[in-house]
């Protein structure tokens, strides 16, 4: 296959036809390989899970440092040692931390349930008694955040996610006058899926901005706070302090977990918030909990010993997964550089690569990949209700497969992207849409928000 | 101290005064001992927790029998092996079982949340959109059931709990015409706190009775299903089959856990219900869960091997706690037999003894015990909103303290019961209330519902 290394849209009709034929042949060859590869979900690989296998023989003790039996009931807020460890990692106070079960998603879910049924510390009434509840959703974003809101009948308005966080001016405009706007999702450090890092400045503006709703809440999902892919380890903005300093101490609620640190399904999750929020949260938790699994808490404390133990452990993860992210970039560069039909992120942390293809071709790319035995996350998954208005966004999750599988799969994805782009441009010219470079790129060129950082 | 072994109410005024003086002296002596004992909550003792310490080194494998890595995400319904084990124990089908986190209380809570926010399989609308939701609460019952309902603003109407289950005729009358009556709590086997066992006949009537609410739900909290105190191991009524046979397959939802089998805070909980209910429940769970802690599931499967392993394990618990229940009975018999100021249950399983004292004296008994360093569950705890209309009910939880502590504490409790009764009878006579045996016992004699079985 020749790689013209000229923008596809600038090819003559004949050259485009030749390119299309080449890509169709390449795709047929890809199908012939009988692949069965999966890049759909951000799951740790077995080799990553193996890093924590010592957990299987822990804890060696059955009491916490205060002498309390961790095997029995109680201790709603979680083991003090574990809360201190996370407090250091998240730059908050131990009194602001609750350690829970195996899923921060569950903590987010029950937080929204509490808002719906009871209202929060600053709520005039339970959200379920409001005529409408709206969340601001930076896109692309985390599909499970959006499906949760959809389940609760909460409306979603989108703003663009940039390299340094959401379009804050757009957020400010949305929250200023509309008291139905109750919350925003933020994955601040190594955002899902773009890898963006929310800057101190943007965090400060989110913390300080006037909101019509007194109980406007920032759901600060710090799922990848420690999940660095380079030596340049980003530090999350200190949202709790920023909010407190701005007179909105109860605005942010932070979530984190060890799901991608120890065992994805058997880790521990934490919530961090103002002490008033913590009291509120524990008050409702007390009605439906006999305390968290403190044995698992102690298991993790013995395993890590301290915050530095977590940091050292994360470097071992990096050794395993950074090459997979490099392989994604290499394959996309090899197959697509110069064609101007795709841009992708070069995350310095987190679990995803955000791939923006030619407008209107993401669904086709995913479908082509499926036809060649490569499972990709459904197009649009990173948007509310699964609807990407430009049909261009694809989330790539390279951690779970082996390195060779990532290479193979991503070379195939590049073929699918190029083929779908050639098909689209050919169709557009045939139907007289965007016959030239100018109009085509006007519609299709990825914006800078998905550009490499 | 002399024990008159004559009903206290039948004593002459002089003899009653002498008895009161004796009890006051006994109580003063009790206070002088500087005790610090706790009979408040149904917690396993350390020796019971030690029975499961092999869990601390398990699992030895990291995959389930299908070869799936238990350390990773997924498997929302829980490990198949564990669901099968519980299915056998609970006489249901594995497809009817969901294995969850460390707390059946949490599963009950989220079930009610689902009913409130979304409605159940047979609900015309979410419960939160109903003008009123009412639950039938057999009393005495489990305080956490009641506090959960109070938190949700659900109204509670009580019916009497008898030796063979709730007063079903009263239940039938409540549910027949009032569509606001949406549920009932039942602890079917070794009820909390009476130890009652719901008979097959009563279970069948609960399953079959006409209800105005199409989504009337039996919350069948089988917390003590395997927690036998004698060789006569009660079998719970098969409520799922009974309900299905009566045309109400979705009426019961059963809950159980290993909290009082392995580690109280680090066990596994299960829910069992019709397949339609299971689908409904998992559908909502999927929005807020990344799957249960399957490592802990496998840990328990390896520990027990099979259902017989659970049954054998429960006999070891029995060896530890049955003597404590015997000590409660001995102390109460020693101190109170013949006085006709108290009745108590002789449970054949579960975690509690139900003590009914002279009407109007339960709060005083608890207060006296506290003054002597013996912590008892607050009087009224076994009633909605903590209000026992006759102020006579006290829940005793003898599992956590050592055997000697149980003996000491219960001898003290007997003194407090006798003293409170003597005070009450003396006051009543002084104020001309119930001057004779007839009127006093008419008010104070415990009903048969709390009587020994």
Image (spheres, coloured by chain):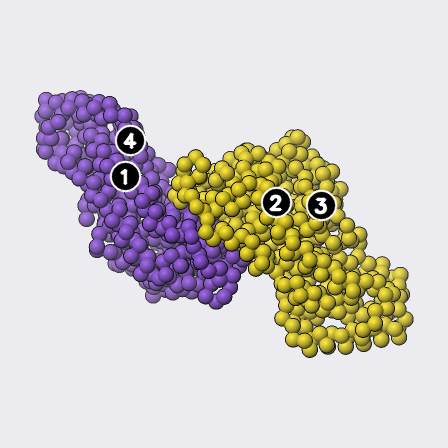
Chain colours: A purple, B yellow
Q: Does B1 sit above or below residue A401? A: below
Same chain for mark 3 and mark 4? The answer is no
User: Element at badge 1?
Assistant: loop
Q: Secondary structure at mark 3?
A: loop
Q: Which mark is residue A402?
A: 1
Question: Could you tell me which residue is drawn at 68 percent across and 59 percent down?
Answer: B324
- Are discs 1 and 3 both within one chain? no
Q: Which mark is residue A374?
A: 4
Which residue is label 3 attached to? B232
Q: Residues within 10 Å of mark 3 (few under 14, many from 20)?
A: few
Residue toward you, A267 or A186: A267
Closer to the N terminus: mark 2 or mark 3?
Answer: 3
Residue A448 picture location, percent across and down? 19, 44
Count of marks, rendered view? 4
Q: Residue at x 66, y 37 (%)?
A: B238
Position of A298 compared to A368: left or right?
right
**Disc 1 versus disc 2: distance between alpha carbons?**
44 Å
A336, A273: nearer the viewer: A336
- Which of the 4 quarters of the picture holds residue A323? top left
- Which numbered circle lies on residue B311? 2
Q: Pinpoint the chain carrying mark 2.
A: B
């Amino acid at each position: 296959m020749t790689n013209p290394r000229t923008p596809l849209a600038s090819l003559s009709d004949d050259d485009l036809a030749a390119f299309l034929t080449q890509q169709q042949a390449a795709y047929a060859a890809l199908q012939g390989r009988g692949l069965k590869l999966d890049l759909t979900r951000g799951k740790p690989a077995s080799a990553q899970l193996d890093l924590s296998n010592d957990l299987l023989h822990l804890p060696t003790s059955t009491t916490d440092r205060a002498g309390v039996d961790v095997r029995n009931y109680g201790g709603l807020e979680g083991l003090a040692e574990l809360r201190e460890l996370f407090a250091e990692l998240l730059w908050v106070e131990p009194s602001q931390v609750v350690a829970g079960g195996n899923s921060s998603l569950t903590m987010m879910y029950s937080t929204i349930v509490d808002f719906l049924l009871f209202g929060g510390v600053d709520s005039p009434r339970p959200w379920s008694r409001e005529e409408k509840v709206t969340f601001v959703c930076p896109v692309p974003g985390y599909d499970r955040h959006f499906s949760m809101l959809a389940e609760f009948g909460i409306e979603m308005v989108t703003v663009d996610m940039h390299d340094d966080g959401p379009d804050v001016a757009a957020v400010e405009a949305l929250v200023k006058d509309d008291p139905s706007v109750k919350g925003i999702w933020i994955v601040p450090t190594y955002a899902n899926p773009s890898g963006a890092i929310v800057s101190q400045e943007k965090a400060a503006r989110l913390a300080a901005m006037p909101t019509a709703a007194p109980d406007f809440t920032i759901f600060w999902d710090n799922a990848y706070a420690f999940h660095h892919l380079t030596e340049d380890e980003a530090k999350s903005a200190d949202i709790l302090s920023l909010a407190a300093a701005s007179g909105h101490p109860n605005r942010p609620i932070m979530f984190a977990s060890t799901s991608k640190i120890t065992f994805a399904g058997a880790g521990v999750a934490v919530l961090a918030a103002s002490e008033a929020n913590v009291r509120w949260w524990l008050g409702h938790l007390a009605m439906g909990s006999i305390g968290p699994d403190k044995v698992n808490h102690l298991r993790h404390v013995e395993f890590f010993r301290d915050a530095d133990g977590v940091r050292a452990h994360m470097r071992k993860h990096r050794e395993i997964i950074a090459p997979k992210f490099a392989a994604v970039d290499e394959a996309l560069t090899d197959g697509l550089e110069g064609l101007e039909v795709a841009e992708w992120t070069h995350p310095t942390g987190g679990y995803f690569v955000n791939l923006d293809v030619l407008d209107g071709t993401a669904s086709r790319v995913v479908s082509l990949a499926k036809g060649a035995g490569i499972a990709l996350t459904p197009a649009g998954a990173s948007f509310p209700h699964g609807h990407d208005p430009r049909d261009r966004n694809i989330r790539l999750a390279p951690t779970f497969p082996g390195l060779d599988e990532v290479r193979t799969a991503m070379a195939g994805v590049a073929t699918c992207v190029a083929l779908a782009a050639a098909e689209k441009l050919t169709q557009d010219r045939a139907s007289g849409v965007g016959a030239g470079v100018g109009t085509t790129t006007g519609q299709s060129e990825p914006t800078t928000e998905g550009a490499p950082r």
